[in-house]
Image (spheres, helix red, strand yellow):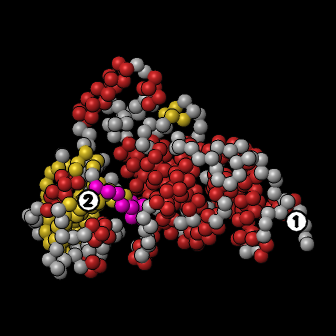
Amino acid sequence: MRTLDPQSLTQHVDRLYRAAWALCGSREDAEDLVQETFTRVLARPRVLSGEHELYYLMRVLRNTFLTSRRTASRRPVTVATLEDVLVADPRSLGQPEQALEMQEVYTTIATLPEDRRLALVAVDVLGLSYREAARALRVREATITTRLFRARKQVARELADAPEARQPQTQAAPREETRTTGVLPSRGTP
Amino acid sequence: MTERTTQQIDDEQQKVAELLRSFDTPAPESLHRRVESLVAARQGPRFTRRDGRPRPFSARLRLAGVGVMAAAVVAGVIAVGLSGGSPALSMGQAAAPTLRAATFPAPPESEAHHAQLAAAVDGVPFPYWEDRFGWRSTGTRSDRIEGHMVTTVFYANSSGRRIGYAILAGSPAPRIGGGVIAWRRGVPYRLLSKNGTSTVTWLRDGHLCVLSGHGVSGTTLLRLASWA
């Protein structure tokens, strides 16, 4: 058991931002999500039972993301004006080509079903192990394997713009080893 | 119909994984600064001991007896009192300097940055709004609130409306209470309108900023405040 050191969290901002971007599909929403995640984590002292900080952050990010989606319909909608778009922080475009590619890939990921999206983000974007991802997302490891497989397959097809991309899943995907398909079980934030 | 081989499927999976792992675009600097501000705020007296070490986690406190909890509360109060931590300010207190008269001339536009004035507090510059929004700087003044030096720049528009933009020196910034929160590009702005006076407060690089004016809408102030 150890107390989470707030200072150590700052090293994860970049990775968490990319994870949030992939979840939301938009840089602006990603910034809000990351900030809200850190606000929640830092609201009070936290204790980690031997886990990696990134795993813990993914858990909070996932909870915050799901909560924000549930409450989004109850909040007033902010419409971005042209001015908002023009003055958006240009410093994040330090690598414009990669940023454009990321935008395309992350926009594709954002169209995935929520459970697959979270699995893909946890493992491939955030770099968690299957075991850590399973614990962070509160599902079994085998479920992560299945969702990840399907998510990668869907992303590959969408990016390749194959006509069969929108066809139903083939038998190539392993059987989903969970009874909680669709929406993940939602619990309070840790 | 062509049957895809296991190898092709594996390759496809690998390619997607490698593509996603190759991205290393950093988060915007503004987001880094906001997170650092949050961390700095959480390392204040409420969360740390006077020697700077983190407080024991709350589960231990819950397991401790009532006497230990009471002692911890008393110790916390003493720590806050001795360390001169940042107390809460009301929106009215924060806005007070912005509603007073200017005592010094207006700062000119910065020669290096056309969106800024040649005036700053701890490196946080005041904005230049004349070309973009028609608000020209008209004067400045200095005050002290709860131990923080406050520099205010006043602006006026062609309609004769006047607003004050104050930046409090020192970090962490005092906590602000009251008003409602409005988010603009990931930044929370606290907005209060009362008796015809609107006030917006927010953080820039960990410094409390206050924009307030009589007869000016909260929407206008929010638009000005969130322009960067």
Mark 1 nearby-residue class (10 Å; few <14, some 14–19, many ≥20): few
Q: Position of residue A56 (x, y in %)?
A: 56, 43
Q: Nearer the viewer, residue A34 or A137?
A: A137
Mark 1 chain:
B
Disc 1 marks which residue? B4
- Decide whether the magenta segment is chiefly helix, strand or loop: strand
Q: Amino acid at mark 2?
A: Leu
What range is drawn magenta here?
B179-187
| Image quadrant containing the C terminus of chain B | bottom left
Would you say B82 lies left or right of A109 here? left
For the residues marked 1 and 2, what is the alpha-carbon distance in whole angstroms?
62 Å
Q: Is residue A179 left or right of residue B180?
A: right
Q: Are marks 1 and 2 on the same chain?
A: yes
Give the image location of residue B176, x and y in percent. Answer: 27, 50
Q: Residue at x 59, y 59 (%)?
A: A23
Q: Residue at x 11, y 69 (%)?
A: B105
Residue B206 among magenta residues: no
Q: Which amino acid does the dot numbered 1 rest on?
A: Arg
Q: Secondary structure at mark 2?
A: strand
Q: Answer yes or no: is residue A39 visible.
A: yes
- Which quarter of the rendering shows the N terminus of chain B? bottom right
Picture quadrant of residue A136: top right
Q: Nearer the viewer, mark 1 or mark 2?
A: 2
Picture residue at 58% right of the left edge, 40% below the top: A52
The subunit carrying tag 2 is B
Residue identifier under label 2? B192
Q: Position of residue A111 (x, y in %)?
A: 64, 65
Q: Tag 1's secondary structure?
A: loop
Q: Circle 2: is it few (<14), some (14-19), or many (20+) Cα within 10 Å?
A: some
Residue at 28%, 71% in the rendered image: B220
